[in-house]
Image: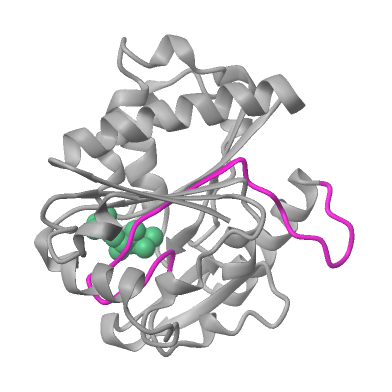
């Protein structure tokens, strides 16, 4: 695993760097395999990246017709709900791009039964990646964020999602949010060619230092589970989120 950590001035700088990495990953994947499969992240940090990708600066560089869009996780809400990761991606990226509906594979989190939503998405991944039993999908790029307590995707501390039991996608109860989530599991993330964290804000600083420099305790800090065995791991963090990192680490 190749790990890169970049401390950048602010979210705009994170988005600028992330957009370049996104374009390079897309162009390389299409050159090599004729398709670019990317898993989008939820939360708010990706919005600045999404805006850049559909801007005049980056839009012409992307092979839109050869892209397949997936989601790393989803809240257990309908796609038009304010909390929906799909809704955020639709508003900030998909609706402003040439992407066709058949290129976008959302988690059907409107289903009352979250376990059924997880199973359905697992089938979508198996079909889209033509997986044989026991195989994992290999995303060309997975975008991730991190919560201020070290969660990523919807892998929350101390939850059942941390034990994947061979699943690609699971549903889980998140007590502290009093809600259910549906999420790809860590083995799926770890099979990606490139995993790119975008982390912003001083509230993330303690967890980020713990994840990168503290003891390996993934039950507490699920972001520590993310280490793509045969891939690149990139942390793009702003000065506020990276403010507690040791100097030597910040230089990597
Ligand atoms: C979600 C995301 C989650 C997110 C972090 C950071 O569904 O919320 O998948 O893992 O990336 O919570 O969110 P921000 O980017 O809003 O800080």
The furthest residue to the front: 248
Q: Quadrant of residue 150?
A: bottom left
Task: In this rendered view, identify the residue nearer to me: 20 or 246.
Answer: 246
Q: Is residue 59 left or right of residue 130?
A: left
Q: Quadrant of residue 105?
A: top right
Ligand 1 in which quarter: bottom left
Who's the residue at 33% across and 88% down the image? 175
Task: Mark yes or no: residue 113 visible.
Answer: no
Residue 119: image location, x then y, percent: 68, 68
Q: Is residue 6 left or right of residue 132?
A: left
Q: Quadrant of residue 171?
A: bottom right
Task: In this rendered view, identify the residue nearer to me: 194 or 83.
Answer: 194
The image shows residue 208, relative to residue 61, as above or below, that is below
Task: Give the magenta part as a residue range.
Answer: 130-154
The furthest residue to the right: 132
Q: Is residue 166 magenta?
A: no
Who's the residue at 50% across and 73% down the image? 225
Q: Main secondary structure of the magenta part?
A: loop
The image shows residue 200, relative to residue 97, as above or below, that is below
Task: In this rendered view, identify the residue nearer to me: 83 or 236.
Answer: 236
Residue 25: image location, x then y, percent: 55, 31
Task: Mark yes or no: residue 203 visible.
Answer: yes
Q: Is residue 164 left or right of residue 81?
A: right
The image shows residue 90, relative to residue 35, as above or below, that is below
Q: Is residue 139 magenta?
A: yes
Check the picture and name the quadrant holding the N terminus: bottom right
The image shows residue 44, relative to residue 47, as above or below, that is below
Who's the residue at 18% across and 74% down the image? 206
Residue 8: image location, x then y, percent: 19, 41
């Amino acid at each position: 695993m190749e790990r890169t950590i970049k401390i950048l001035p602010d979210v705009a700088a994170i988005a600028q760097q992330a957009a370049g990495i996104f374009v390079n990953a897309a162009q390389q994947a299409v050159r090599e395999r004729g398709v670019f499969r990317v898993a989008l992240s939820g939360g708010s940090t990706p919005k600045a990246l999404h805006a850049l990708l559909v801007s005049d600066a980056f839009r012409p560089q992307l092979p839109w017709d050869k892209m397949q869009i997936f989601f790393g996780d989803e809240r257990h809400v309908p796609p038009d709900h304010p909390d929906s990761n799909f809704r955020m991606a639709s508003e900030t990226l998909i609706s402003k791009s040439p992407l066709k509906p058949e290129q976008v594979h959302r988690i059907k989190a409107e289903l009352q039964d979250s376990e059924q939503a997880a199973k359905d998405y697992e089938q979508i991944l198996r079909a889209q990646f033509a997986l044989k039993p026991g195989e994992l999908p290999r995303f060309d790029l997975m975008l991730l964020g991190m919560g201020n307590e070290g969660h990523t995707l919807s892998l929350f501390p101390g939850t059942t999602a941390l034990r994947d039991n061979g699943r690609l996608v699971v549903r889980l109860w998140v007590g502290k949010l009093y809600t259910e989530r549906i999420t790809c599991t860590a083995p799926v993330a770890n099979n990606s060619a490139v995993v790119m964290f975008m982390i912003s804000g001083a509230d993330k600083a303690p967890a980020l230092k713990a994840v990168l420099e503290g003891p390996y305790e993934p039950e507490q800090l699920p972001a520590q589970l993310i280490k793509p065995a045969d891939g690149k791991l990139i942390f793009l963090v702003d000065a506020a989120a990276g403010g507690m990192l040791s100097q030597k680490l910040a230089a990597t």
